[in-house]
Image (cartoon, helix red, strand yellow):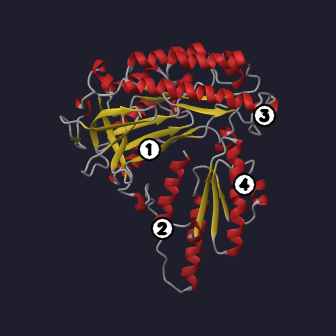
Amino acid sequence: MNEADSRTLAARLEALGYAPSPRMEQAEVIVLNTCVIRQQAEDKIHRQLSQFKTIKERRPELTLAVMGCLVGQRELVKLQERFPFVDVFLPPSEPAALLDLLQNRALDAAAEAQETKCAVDTEWPVMPPSAQGQTVTAQVPVVLGCSHACSFCIIPYRRGAEQSRPRDAILEEVRRLVAHGIREVTLLGQIVDRYGLDLDGGYELADLLRDVARVEGLHRVRFLTSHPNWMSDRLLDTVASDAKLCPLFELPIQAGNDTVLERMRRGYTAGQFRDLVARIRQRLPEAAINTDVIVGFPGETEVQFMDTFQVLEDLRLDVIHLAQYSERPGTFAARQMPDDVPAAEKQRRWEMIEAQGKRILGEKHQTLRGQTVSVLIEGRDEKRDRWWGRTPQGKLVFFPDAKSRLGDIVEVELDWTGPFTMIGHPAESAGVIDPGYNSAAIAGFGEAGNRGNT
């Protein structure tokens, strides 16, 4: 979500006549976009701001802005008092205050110079001109905020209540991104499956996915992050019905023990999570399922931790986004639950899950050796003279090729696989897929029974 906010703000700053600075010391405007999902991240931000104070003292004309999750409504006054050298604080996804400040300064400067007008763009772009043609993927927020307050999570307090963006605004943004060379979009929400539930008309995420997939020139559509309580069979059937919709699910389990899940206020049991994974794999056998896990949650015993370990062993999921619990002031857990799992024990449990996930992913990827996968090319590794991109399941693939491939979909035969990357070569019988391809006809994306090789 912060990447999407940064992209939007960068586009609007360039529309005002600014350009990216290669060095922070040379910049006229510095924007610090913040994530505070963990206490460690917030502490790092405060240290960074202390360094910015020195820069601001040397260059008082510098415009310094702070945006993102640090700037919650409850924290704004405290931030202004602690960091008075910051010119403007911007709540998440709300860059207007900085843009207004810069526009007004430009108008004042024009008036002092007795200029008749000041050129200010009012039609905001969705991509920075400096990035156009350099990237082929983009994130598009569709649900802002969150109304499901897990006991450990600070996001609802910082990003506010859940709010779905209008369908037409989302589709217009996607069309404009595609016009600038974007070939894959990821629809974002803290609980993206809840898109549309706060709107009238019964228009849901499944409907939005279908409409986005119809945008001409777009190759792929992803979405994240999901929640087990709101991933419906209709949504799964929609993903299975359209090859542009990538069979990748970001589905956090957080813990595999029911008591821990209840204390986390997740709203489901480990058994219900197992059932959901089974339903996904029944409809989409080739799907990748990534997950989130927190170890060392308050009160988590060794037996409860091993329940999580066993669930992960049984389900053999893909990427595990793994974290040790850290107390976040302001959350229910911080107020009501003592952080009683020792740091050394958290680290041991983290290492166990990390090693387990690496082993399982390596074993799963071994089965792909010699197979051909469809790779959307996102960039080039100049140092090793090779292209890189991802499969529909989000697997990272490298391959050498002298041709210009950025933005193409290339069929790649895999020669080597590891837990996190794969290496291959362009398949002899396949080439670049034209942007106007018929998605249903792509090799490996046909009937459900033929999708296992993707």
Estimate the spatial distance between the alpha carbons at disc 2 and disc 4, rounded to whole Å.
27 Å
- Return the x and y of residue 118 as percentages of the image width and height: 49, 76
Estimate the spatial distance between the alpha carbons at disc 2 and disc 3, rounded to whole Å.
42 Å
The circle drawn on residue 170 is 1
Name the residue rendered at 31%, 50% in the picture: 406
Q: Which residue is mark 3?
A: 334
Circle 1 sits in a helix, a strand or a loop, which is it?
helix
Name the residue rendered at 36%, 23% in the picture: 367
In the image, 270: left or right of 231?
Answer: right
Residue 118 higher or lower than 376, as above or below = below
- Return the x and y of residue 395 as percentages of the image width and height: 41, 34
Amino acid tagged 2:
Ala
Estimate the spatial distance between the alpha carbons at disc 3 and disc 4, rounded to whole Å.
20 Å
Q: Nearer the viewer, mark 1 or mark 2?
A: 2
| Sequence order check, earlier mark of 1 and 4 | 4
| Sequence order check, earlier mark of 2 and 3 | 2
Residue 303 higher or lower than 73, as above or below = above
- Return the x and y of residue 221 as percentages of the image width and height: 39, 37
Q: Are marks 3 and 1 in contact (CB under 8 Å)?
A: no
Q: Are marks 2 and 3 in contact (CB under 8 Å)?
A: no
Q: Nearer the viewer, mark 3 or mark 1?
A: 3
Residue 358 higher or lower than 183, as above or below = above
Amino acid tagged 4:
His
Q: Nearer the viewer, mark 1 or mark 4?
A: 4
The circle drawn on residue 46 is 4
| Sequence order check, earlier mark of 3 and 4 | 4
Q: Which residue is mark 2?
A: 19
Front residue of this view, candidates 74 and 401: 401
